[in-house]
Image (cartoon, helix red, strand yellow):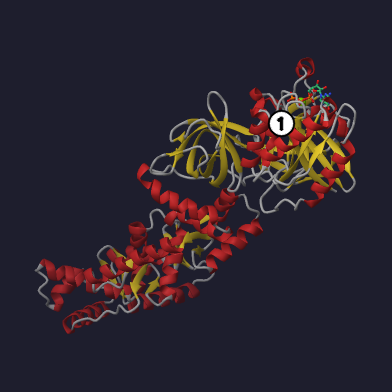
Amino acid sequence: MRSIIVGTAGHIDHGKTSLVRALTGVDADRLPEEKRRGITIDLGFAELPLGDCTLGFVDVPGHERFVKNMLAGAHGIDLVALVIAADEGVMPQTREHFDICRLLETRAGLIIITKTDMVDEELLALVRAEAEELVAGSFLEGAPVVAVSSRTGAGIEELKTALGALARSLPARSAETVARLPIDRSFTMRGFGAVVTGTLVAGEIREGDEMELLPVGSRVRVRGLQVHGKAVERALAGQRTAVNLGGIEASLIERGMVLAPTDRLRPTQIMDVQLDVLKSASRPLRSRSRVRVHLGAAEVLGRVRVLSRVGELAPGESGFAQLRLESPVVALPGERFIIRSYSPSRTTGGGRVLDSSAVKHRGREAGLMHARLAALSEADESERVAYFVETSGEKGMRRAELAARTGWLDEVLERAAQLAITRGAVVDAEGVLVSRAAFDQLGQLALAEVEAFHKREPLARGLMRETLRERHFTHAPAEVFRAVIAELEKAGRVVSEKEVVRIASHSLSLSAEDAALRDGLEQLYSRAAFEPPTFDEALSQIGTAASAAGRKEHGRKILQLLIEAGRLVRVQNDLFFHCDALAGLKARLTEYGARHEPERLIDVAAFKEMAGVSRKYAIPLLEYFDRERVTRRAGDKRIIL
Ligand SMILES: Nc1nc2c(ncn2[C@@H]2O[C@H](COP(=O)(O)OP(=O)(O)OP(=O)(O)O)[C@@H](O)[C@H]2O)c(=O)[nH]1
Ligand SMILES: [Mg+2]
């Protein structure tokens, strides 16, 4: 069964509540004060089954002081019933409510002329003409105009038929975003605890669901659900829904809070928007002016920053702006909102959220931001992904952050992300999305750094990965670093070996002199076996001019080459052994172990004798073998592993 939400709209006393009663039999004025004063103060609710669909009515107050309450209900409606009393015609809140519906982009509706029993045909025709003039050029142009009297019942049946036809002609709500219930009422029900109500604007809620109450972030449990006054197991998008919540007290819940899936959405205070100022606004909307922002069922104060050179939007103008709110709200791109002046409260405009999690823009960025937001406002899903990912620069954006930023369901997000990747705007760096531009920029920097390193250190094998990461990737997550290097490697630009990265074409071309030095050193250590010289001794034995500091430095680099190639092994600071000597010793250790089963123990004395080394070398060698997991210390002995 389809649920359609119908919101009333119109001037005070024009017969909205009476009409809802004539249609549904329900008096939507439930507060004692409303009954006493004969006016609607806060939202009222009623429903009307109409064949294959149910209309959920949200009855709003017409009084100009309660427009804020009207707004808490108007955001989620599918159809507007614009009520105009035949005896008064179009009045200020007729216009204001109608403006609000236009700004909220209410999809459809109809005009209902009430109190027909109080006027003659001629006056009725006049009001009808006035109504048609009001809506000319808007979404209500050509909409049905139905004349009724709630007192006599005249026209009520025709109205039901018209409502049914409209309801059936409405396209289904888009199902791209996660569940959101902006709360318009909360109260305690004896024996049940906290109950909240609202129009479920997207997704579905099931009994037993764990949910999050935003912006406070409290975890709550759905203990029970009602739709149109009946207990149900799940509520669907577009339904007036009452939720019995466990895990929270009603006194902590306020109108405007949003019930959403846990860990999915994040509250925000700065957003970039597209803004339309009403033609009827009394003055331009200036940057820094304080306004009331109505978004979902919430009302928050904030300041506008118009993103244009003049810094203001004249009545009737549209543009881009940033809203900086004084308290956090839940907002998603595409959501509509209303702006009212701070004092006196008048509806001055409204618009659409483009980026709900923006950063403050500096004044001189206004022009650039204007252009970027103009593009964003026209962007498809994949382009929006590209935009959001780009705003996070080299930090990139994880799927969870993108989900919070868009409100999209996983499959929608993945589809958009894949398209952005295919189109080449975004790179998937091991799960972190980065803009192609930021990714390539990092690649260029890395390449330049490695090239510069080779120039500086022609004898080194390559630049340490860690050094490279610290230089250029401090703001990027590890995934991005690895992906950048991997891509450079795949493209054949660099080779990444263990701890170092080198340019693919880089090869060590030693001069004849250096090669001789290298070979000399290796032979020396090979011959010395377990009586290795210190490095200084080695250099002087080969007969280089080791006294010159520069030569010594150079010699160290050649030594490093031998170490990197695995020919020499640094066992302790200035203690090097030839790899063959160590391999031989390791073989003898293993053999010794086999001869001493099952304990496989060896003490320092036995080791000294076996290796034929002094104590000076025995301990560092054993510690080296410990590190290499050839032996393990056990008291003052070693187990041969
Ligand atoms: N004669 C006549 N009176 C009506 C009709 N509809 C409403 N009224 C009267 O008009 C007055 C206001 O009606 P409501 O239904 O409370 O008007 P409303 O638009 O809900 O008012 P607010 O919610 O305060 O904006 C009441 O005294 C109703 O009895 C009608 O069709 N004919
Ligand atoms: Mg009323």
Q: Residues within 10 Å of mark 1 (few under 14, many from 20)?
A: many
The three-letter amino acid code for the residue at tag 1 is Gly
> Which of 326 and 221 lies nearest the eye of the viewer?
326
> Which of 617 and 477 lies nearest the eye of the viewer?
477
Question: Mark 1 = which residue?
Answer: 10
From where the camera sits, is residue 91 visible? Answer: yes
Residue drawn 40% across and 53% down? 475
Residue drawn 83% across and 37% down? 228
Say which quarter of the image contains residue 464.
Answer: bottom left
> Which of 493 and 27 lies nearest the eye of the viewer?
27
Task: Say if disc 1 is inside 8 Å of ligand 1.
Answer: yes
The picture quadrant for ligand 1 comes to top right
| Residue 567 locus on image (x, y percent) | 31, 77
Vertical placement of residue 587 versus 463, above or below: below
| Residue 299 locus on image (x, y percent) | 60, 31
User: In the image, is 606 to the left or to the right of 199?
Assistant: left
User: In the image, is 372 to the left or to the right of 123?
Assistant: left
- Secondary element type, mark 1: loop
